[in-house]
Amino acid sequence: MEPNGITSGATDAVAPRKNGREARSRKKKYSTGNGHSSSGSIGGNIANEACDSGDIRRSDRMAMRKKRVVRSKARKSSQGGRSNVMVLCLISAAIFALYLLVCLIFFHNLPGGDGRGMKGLVKRTKEKVSQFRAKHSIGNIKLAEDVRDENEEEEVAAPKGPAPVGRWPVSIRDEDGAFEEIKHPGFPDGHVTMLVPRFWAEDPVAIHENKLMSRERALSIGTCITPDPKTGSNTRGDECPLNERTIFVAIASYRDWQCVDTVTSIFSAATHPERVRVAVVDQIVDGEDGSCDVPRAPCATDPNQPICLHKNQIDVYQMEAELAVGPVFARHIGHRLYRGEYYSMQSDAHVSFTKGWDVDIISQQEATGDELAVLSTYLTDIVGSIDPQTGLSLRKTRPIMCNTEYEGGAQGKHLRHLSQPEGIPDIHGMPQLQPYWAAGYSFSRGHFVATVPYDLYQVSTPYFAIPCVTGLPCQTLPMY
């Protein structure tokens, strides 16, 4: 009879086997709570749980065993792969070293006289470099590496080539017969030619040397009305007093009846008219239009007219109006009239100047402290701008060009810069940068004209990055 609460599994667990040995159960013995243990399970539920736990433990052990096998294989594979890569790298390095050694021995042992081997290659390379330098080294032009070597060995030297000699007084009338013939840009077939003055610096590269202009080079350009007492030269740099520094004024006029009044105003309003030279490209119809250098009244009748007093300081290049192809070509010829003055100014042909304009504009230019600064602006309307008694400016506003747009009609559109409404500036006594340059009025050092003159075939006005200076009528200035 079976004990109460004990299943037959306990009896089966101790049943003898045929070989006489005792069969052992895989089930764990469980305590009955009274100090006795049993090889069976306590109750049917306990037996089932024990079986399930045994199955779970077996499955866990199997899973762990599989993971260990997988990791072992992965380690072996990884170690083998790294070993293979290392072997390949060593083999490649050995092959490269052997190849390099063979090449060095081979080229070193070959004779160089017959043009073979490393020696011959070096020799041929040196010969080609020498031929290239001999072909492309012209005058003072040198290879970049030569220039770098010289700069490393010695300090920056003074300008290599002298600027043209500046003289005062000067006039293109003294150069009659030395003009050059050019083809008119308005006739592509070239059948129309013109005799025009030569540039003061025929090669602008001789002025700027394809680099930012140095102070030494800048001071070598610009005449003084009185020569140096020691050297006799009119080029005195910044040793020339401000009131003796010459001013070149270029005007392009197309049948403009106000041109003569503009020239008169330039001399009559200047504090030092003796240092001003006016050059006009006068495009007129002969017999219908008056010339810019002919005063309203004959000089014999009124010799004290400014044009009569300063006639030797006025150069007029007259051309037929029908040959005009726009202001740019006329201004190109105007830049040909420059002859080394200290400052250069460009103006429209219908402008009235305020009293002391020359001293005022030079003070604004010098206030920039920049040799490459260019003052420029759209000029203010004359109405209400000049005191009729004193000739001084009545305005303290600052015009700034700050926008641009296309305008025009049936003949085509063109770019025009726009000015903001003029107002009194909050900051005084210092330059005000602006983005545009105006051809109607521009003031700069003289080397501006010599360095970047108007091009013969230029179809529109060049636009420079431009700023504006202090609080009087003309106060816009660019950099070039």
Image (spheres, rainbow, N blue to C red):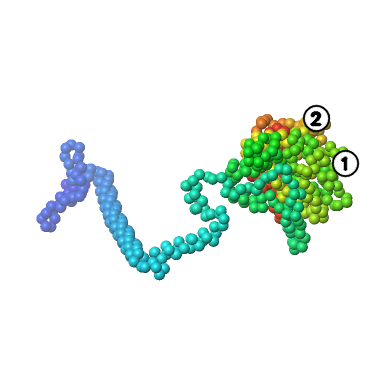
Position in image of residue 427 (x %, y %): 66, 31
Could you tell me if the residues under marks 2 and 1 are in contact, i.e. CB atoms within 8 Å? no
Residue 400 or 245: which is nearer the viewer? 245
Position in image of residue 342 (x %, y %):
68, 41
Question: Mark 2: which amino acid?
Answer: Thr
* Residue 156 in view in this figure: yes
Q: Give the residue displayed 39% in from the left and 64% down from the top.
A: 119
Q: Is residue 53 left or right of residue 405?
A: left
Query: Which residue is under mark 2?
Result: 390
Towards the viewer: 233 or 43: 233
From what the image shows, is residue 250 above or below residue 127?
Answer: above
Residue 88, horizontal then vertical, whole percent: 32, 61
Quarter of the image where one finds residue 236: top right
Q: Position of residue 244 (x, y in %)?
A: 70, 36
Query: Mark 1 packing: few (<14 Cα in 10 Å), some, or many (20+)?
Result: few
Residue 421 visible from this viewpoint: no
Q: Residue at x 11, y 57 (%)?
A: 19
Q: In the picture shown, does residue 332 fall above or below 427?
A: below
- Look at label 1 and name its amino acid: Ala
Among numbered discs 2 and 1, the one appearing first in the sequence: 1
- Residue beneath the point at 73% across and 45% down: 170
Q: Which residue is mark 1?
A: 300
Q: Residues within 10 Å of mark 2 (few under 14, many from 20)?
A: few
Position of 429 with respect to 192 (left or right) is left
- Marks 2 and 1 sit apart, C-alpha to C-alpha, by 28 Å
Q: Horizontal placement of 97 versus 40: left or right? A: right
